[in-house]
Amino acid sequence: MEFFDCAVIGAGAAGLNASLILGRSRKKVALFDNGTNRNRVTQESHGFLTRDGIKPAEFKEIAINDVKKYPSVHFYKNTVMNITKQSNGLFKIETLEDVEIVAERIILATGVQEEFPSVSDIKKYYGKSLFSCPTCDGWELRDQPLIIISENEEHTLFKGKLIYNWSKDLVIATNGQELSTPTLNELQRKDITVITEPIQNLNGEDGYLNKVVFSSGLEIERAGGFIVPIFVRPNQFAEQLSCQLNENGSIVTDEAGRTSQENVYAAGETAKLGQSSLIVAAAEGYKSAMAVVFDSTI
C-alpha cells in the first residue's frame, strides 16, 4: 500500500491551496476529489483578487494545473469512503474506486452541501438567479426587485439587513414560518415586505426567476434573490476520526486548522460548517498546509 506524507480530502479552494503548499514543501501528497464542489452550479465566482468573475470550473482547472506542476502531488479523481486510523498511527484511506493508501497526516477539506427550503424546483434557479451569498453575488443583482427565501428566523433578520446594502426592493418569504413581532418590526423599519404564506412555485426560464407564486394565489415579480439554506457535511469523517465539534457542528480547530486529533487538520467550509468565499477557503488551506509542514519537522 502506497505511503503519503499527507492526504488531502477535497479539491476545492482549501484543498487545492493546501496541496500546492505541500507540493512546494516537497511533501508526498494524495489529493482526492469527486467533483461535487458546491460552487459547480454557479456561473461566476467573485471576490478573489485577479480572478473576479471567473467561472468556477475554470478556476478549478487553473488550480489543478498549478498543483500538478509539483511531482510529489498525486491527484485522484476518487470518492473517499473510509478513513481509519491504524494501530501504527497512520491513516488508511479507501475510495469507492478501490484505491487504498496510507498517510501520516490528513487534511479534511471536503466542503459542505446545501439543504434547501422546501420549495418546488428551487434548485433550477440556484446559481443563476438565486444565490446564498450576497457578498459573492449581490453586485450583479443590485437595485433589482429581490426575494429572500428563508425558513429560519435568526438568519432571516440577518440576511434581510445584509442584502439591503445591494437592493432596497426586498421581499422576504418565510414559506409558512411565522416571525416574532420584534423581527417583523425590525424589517418593517427598513420597508422590507414579509410574506409568511407558503410558496406554491417559482416561475422563470432557464434558471432565471421572474415571478413567485404563493399558496393564496398571490403573485409577485422578482428578478432574483437569495436563499438561506442549511449547510451539512457530505460525510462523517470528522466524527469517525473523533474530532471535537462545537455545539453548532463546526470542527474545533486552532488558527492553523489543527483539530483535537493529532495529525488531523480541517480547512475551509468543512471546518466551519458554513459557506465561505474562495479566497478565505484558500487562505485556510494555506495555513493548514503550513501546520502540516511545521508539525512534521518537530
Image: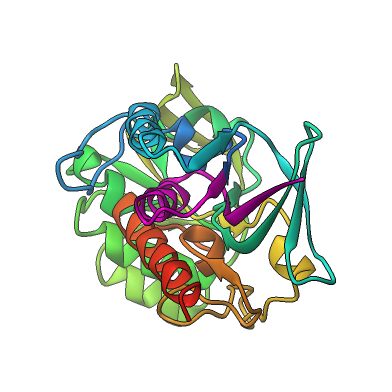
Looking at the image, which is closer to me, 234 or 185? 234
Q: In the displayed structure, does residue 142 sit left or right of residue 5?
A: left
Quadrant where the N terminus is found in the figure = top right
On whether residue 105 falls in the magenta region, the answer is no
Q: Horizontal and vertical percent for residue 95?
A: 76, 40
Q: Is residue 126 visible?
A: no
Q: Horizontal and vertical percent for residue 154?
A: 49, 73
Residue occupying image coordinates x 61% and y 73% = 263
On whether residue 10 falls in the magenta region, the answer is yes
Against 240, residue 103 (above or below) is above
Q: Horizontal and vertical percent for residue 65?
A: 36, 30
Against 281, residue 39 (above or below) is above
Where does the magenta region start and end?
A: 1-30
Residue occupying image coordinates x 20% and y 52% = 166
Tell me the quarter of the picture where residue 53 sits.
top left
Q: How is the image coloured?
A: rainbow
Looking at the image, which is closer to me, 80 or 271? 80
Looking at the image, which is closer to me, 58 or 207? 58
Which residue reaches farthest top?
A: 206
Q: Horizontal and vertical percent for residue 32?
A: 60, 42
